[in-house]
Image (cartoon, helix red, strand yellow):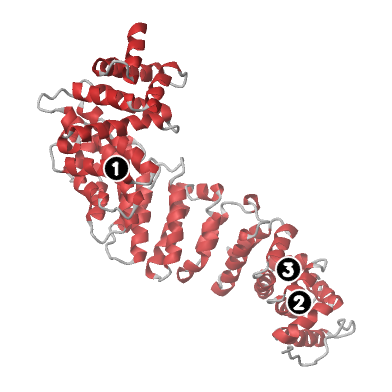
Amino acid sequence: MPSVTSGIPIPEHLWPRWTTQELESQLSDLAALAANENERQRFSERSALINEIVAKLESTYTEPSVRFQCLRVLGNVCADNNLNRNLVMSVPGFVDALDSCWSGPDEKLRNTAIIVAFNFCNDYDVAQSFLVKARNDVLGLLVSMLANIHDEATAAYVLRLMEFLILNEAFTENKLRPDALPVILRAIPASEVADNIILISTLLTFESFRLQTLKNNYADLILLCEKYELLIDTEDVDALKVILGDFSNISGMDVFSAESIPESLVELWERWISLYDNRAQTSYLRVAGLTFIGNLCTNETACVYMVNSRNTHISAISIIKNSNSTANEMYSAAGLLKNLAISDKNKRTLVQSDVFSAIGRLLECDESPQVIFSALGLLRVVLSNSYENAHDFVSTDYKNVFLTKAVQLHSQHSEKSIRLETSRLFCTLIRSLSLKSDQDLDLVTTIAPENTETKLTTVLSMILSLLNEEQHRRILSSEALFSLALVARDSKAAAAVAEILDNSSDLSGKVREIFTSTEFDDKVKDNAKTLMLVVGQAATEGGNAYKIYKELARDV
């Protein structure tokens, strides 16, 4: 059905001889007419009238009451009608008219002009782009107004208008100063944090705004955390998902430093970690706290402090062991523990705090590849460069369970990163166990789950597979060759390595390439030479391993 209109005529011009009162009355009638959706479309044919209304609005000589009615007409004309918005865009002085109201002393005009701009831009990219381009500092002007608006309803219009403009492709980072962030955060009422997540999160995609949170003794980050903490009492779980990305991006910056973080922030994040109800809202805050503290622990001083003075590792281990913890929580807790274990001073403390049990829980999460990956990485770092931890590990029931799981993952898992981590785990275990001579420890049977020759060959093949990795090739090849050279002191292991190389022209070719390639330094080449001189003595004559051995023996 065609839309029904009232038939009330819309004048083509404002009468020039009307008194202020008559003009105000006529404009009020036009505003009421434009408020009706069916009548509104008729204004698209009244360009001269719209031109005159904008001119009246722009003139500071016009009575404030008349200017207010002009704003009412324009606001209603622009509401949900793109034809009318296009008409308004074509009128010279429209943005200047809004600007004169925004910048003037009349609060009523300023607030109404904000609503006009909102109606003009709402769900219309063309209008948003027009406003951004027509007034380069429009966002800065909105922020200045926001700082002085004490009415929550009007502030909500400004915040939503800013969201429109920032999301528009015409917006660039240099169009808004980063110090606008605290003004925006303070203007958001506690009840409307979720409604403004998109605005905040979009700003935080820009590095300058993330850096802003770390200035002024982290005052803006504290404010941001306090705002986001309010979401725990909302049902908007999607908003909480967004904050994880924001917090991860902030705490992942190189300038995020433990040396300058105020203790009040650390206490805030610890409070999040210690929240123990099972709601999704609480879970997201726990993950955020784990992420912040995990990224904080990137140097020796911070790691030792968080373990010795704050017992952060106890909280992380407890989260992993909790049967109600989500995969996200477990992954984040494992990441925190892995960072804490970077410090050699902390490794022993983690083992004494039952970290192996926590790793066992992580390895049970077959449905989450990222949790499995974090478990393998955590175990590798805990064992790295620590004979005591490695010895304790192989002396427990965890050894066979964990190493058998690693072998299984390497052969069956589709994720390359997980297969790679299992190989590195065995390299680390071998190196750490070799730090001290232990007459009671048979290295070969120790690293082969279930102590079978088949398992030994499988483990050595896993380690040799690191030679095939193109990414980080030098580091991974060095790890593989060094650990193999250590374990090949045993004749069974040496024979097994020789057999693997004999059966793989590709792997034996990778070994040969190490001696000729400039990509590898002398240390890597020395490890390869040590390995092959031992392996060659156990190799079958005529095989790949034997040939490499004879070539090296001749060169020596």
The disc placed on residue 67 is: 2
Residue that appears at 54% across and 51% down: 209
Q: Residues within 10 Å of mark 3 (few under 14, many from 20)?
A: many
Q: Please state the total of marks drawn on the protein image.
A: 3
Q: Which residue is mark 1?
A: 376
On screen, residue 345 above or below 357: above
Give the Cα distance between marks 1 and 2.
69 Å
Q: Nearer the viewer, residue 551 or 526?
A: 551
Looking at the picture, how far across and down is residue 523, in whole percent? 36, 18
Q: Residue furthest front?
A: 542
**SS label for mark 1:** helix
Label 1 or label 2, whichever comes before in sequence order: 2
Q: Please state which of the two labelled residues, at mark 2 or mark 3, is closer to the viewer.
A: 3
Q: Residue at x 85, y 85 (%)?
A: 11
Q: Which one is nearer the viewer's eye here, 451 or 447?
A: 451
Q: CA distance from mark 2 to mark 3?
A: 11 Å
Mark 2 surroundings: few (<14), some (14-19) or many (≥20) residues within 10 A = many
Please identify, in this view, whether the residue under mark 3 or under mark 1 is nearer the observer: 1
Q: Earlier in the sequence, mark 2 or mark 3?
A: 2
Q: Position of residue 153 (x, y in %)?
A: 56, 74
Residue 190, x across and y down, in percent: 45, 68
Pick the quarter of the image with the N terminus. Answer: bottom right
Label 3, label 1: how far apart the Cα atoms are: 60 Å
Whichever of callouts 3 and 1 sits on the residue coming sooner in the sequence is 3
Q: Residues within 10 Å of mark 1 (few under 14, many from 20)?
A: many
Q: Which residue in the structure is indicated by mark 3?
A: 98
**Residue shown at 24%/32% (left/top)?**
429
Q: Secondary structure at mark 2?
A: helix
